[in-house]
Image: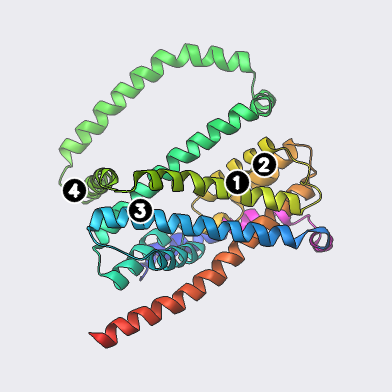
């Protein structure tokens, strides 16, 4: 996958932003404090969290296999979808969002499937993930509603906010209607432009992906694996919390809240959520009474363990990928 000059600039800019955020967060944290925290950390629980992460990776690869088979009408081994997935994660650490395209390219090389169809399955997969993320946020709100209210109260007056929302409601509705009409007119006028064609193509792929979801034969397996993936995220976070003395006493609801903030941090368009993940996780841990240093050290431990797991596994999967493609080339 070759990057254009513009894409290189975007990659370097996002990396610079990630490094700056990380430096800003940790410039006052002494290295010895991190070393001391690691000495007190139970690496047995860290190892357990990594094993659970592998289960999550496998479930995601298996779920993607179901979507690919429904779209392509041909079989693919879970091992190969796993190889593609982990290479995609590895690429995401270098180029934000490029991993989604990269893993489709890996499957296309190994299996000969169409890139457009594969990208459609990834779009659908991300849509399902967004749905489960919203459900998880809602669940966290139900369990930790007092924390939500306290955080919002610290930022704004609840009564004043509700009053402003009530006053602005007609304006928001009117503005929404005008925006819909404006977007429709823009689409009609520039329907043949390159940008509009890309948007239409994206929507077509998304609709095709949603339609392919109906073709998945193992519906129970698809939805149960989708739920299990997020459960593995939670258990991973829980095990790391138990590994570190400062977070070992966090409640189950508190850990869920930390996971939600971490997930939001990973969505940011920077390499591997560097900086944004750490900032949001440390912020919410401070809201639970941990010190600034304790929150940041927890964030760096869990993030580093996951990144190292992805790097090592991704590199091993690349070796398997090159072997598979070379064997395929020699037979043809």
Q: Earlier in the sequence, mark 3 or mark 1?
A: 3
Disc 4 and disc 1 in contact, CB within 8 angstroms: no
How packed mark 3 is, by other alpha carbons closer than 10 Å (few <14, some 14-19, many 20 or more), is: many
Provide the major secondary structure of the magenta segment. Answer: helix
| Residue 116 point in image, percent of width and height | 25, 58
| Residue under pointer 1 | 234
Mark 4 vs mark 3: in front? 3
Region in magenta: 17-38
Labelled disc at residue 255: 2
Up the image or down, 262 lies above or below 165; here it is below
In the image, what residue occupies the spot 69% across and 56% down?
300
| Residue 153 point in image, percent of width and height | 67, 23
| Residue under pointer 4 | 193
How packed mark 2 is, by other alpha carbons closer than 10 Å (few <14, some 14-19, many 20 or more), is: many
In the image, what residue occupies the spot 25% across and 69% down?
112
Up the image or down, 317 lies above or below 164; here it is below
Mark 4 vs mark 1: in front? 1
Image quadrant where one finds the C terminus: bottom left
Q: Earlier in the sequence, mark 4 or mark 3?
A: 3
Mark 3 vs mark 1: in front? 1
Helix or strand or loop: what does disc 4 sit on?
loop
Spatial CA span between label 4 and label 3: 25 Å
In the image, what residue occupies the spot 65% across and 62% down?
305
Q: Nearer the viewer, residue 122 or 171?
A: 122
Spatial CA span between label 2 and label 1: 8 Å
Asked if residue 34 is among those painted magenta in the image, a careful observer would answer yes
| Residue 185 point in image, percent of width and height | 20, 32
């Amino acid at each position: 996958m070759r990057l254009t000059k513009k894409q290189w600039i975007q990659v370097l800019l996002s990396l610079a932003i990630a490094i700056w955020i990380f430096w800003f967060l940790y410039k006052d944290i002494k290295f010895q404090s991190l070393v001391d925290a690691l000495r007190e950390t139970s690496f047995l629980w860290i190892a357990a969290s990594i094993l659970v992460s592998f289960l999550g990776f496998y479930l995601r690869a298996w779920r993607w296999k179901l979507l690919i088979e429904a779209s392509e009408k041909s079989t693919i081994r879970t091992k190969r979808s796993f190889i593609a997935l982990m290479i995609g994660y590895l690429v995401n650490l270098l180029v934000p969002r490029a991993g989604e395209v990269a893993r489709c390219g890996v499957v296309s090389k190994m299996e000969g499937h169409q890139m457009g169809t594969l990208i459609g399955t990834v779009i659908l997969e991300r849509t399902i993930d967004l749905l489960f993320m919203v459900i998880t946020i809602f669940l966290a709100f139900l369990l930790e509603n007092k924390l939500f209210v306290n955080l919002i109260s610290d930022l704004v007056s609840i009564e004043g906010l509700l009053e402003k929302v009530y006053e602005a409601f007609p304006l928001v509705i009117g503005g929404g209607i005008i925006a819909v009409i404006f977007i429709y007119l823009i689409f009609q006028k520039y329907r043949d432009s390159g940008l509009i064609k890309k948007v239409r193509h994206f929507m077509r792929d998304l609709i095709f992906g949603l339609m392919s979801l109906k073709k998945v034969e193992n519906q129970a397996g698809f939805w149960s694996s989708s739920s299990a993936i997020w459960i593995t995220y939670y258990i991973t976070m829980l095990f790391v919390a138990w590994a570190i003395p400062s977070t070992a006493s966090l409640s189950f609801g508190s850990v869920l809240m930390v996971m939600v903030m971490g997930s939001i941090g990973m969505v940011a368009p920077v390499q591997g959520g560097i900086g944004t993940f750490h900032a949001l996780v440390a912020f919410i841990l401070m809201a639970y009474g941990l010190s600034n240093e304790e929150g940041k050290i927890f964030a760096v431990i869990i993030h580093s363990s996951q990144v190292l797991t992805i790097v090592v596994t991704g590199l091993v999967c690349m070796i398997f990928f090159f072997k598979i493609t070379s064997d395929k080339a020699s037979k043809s």
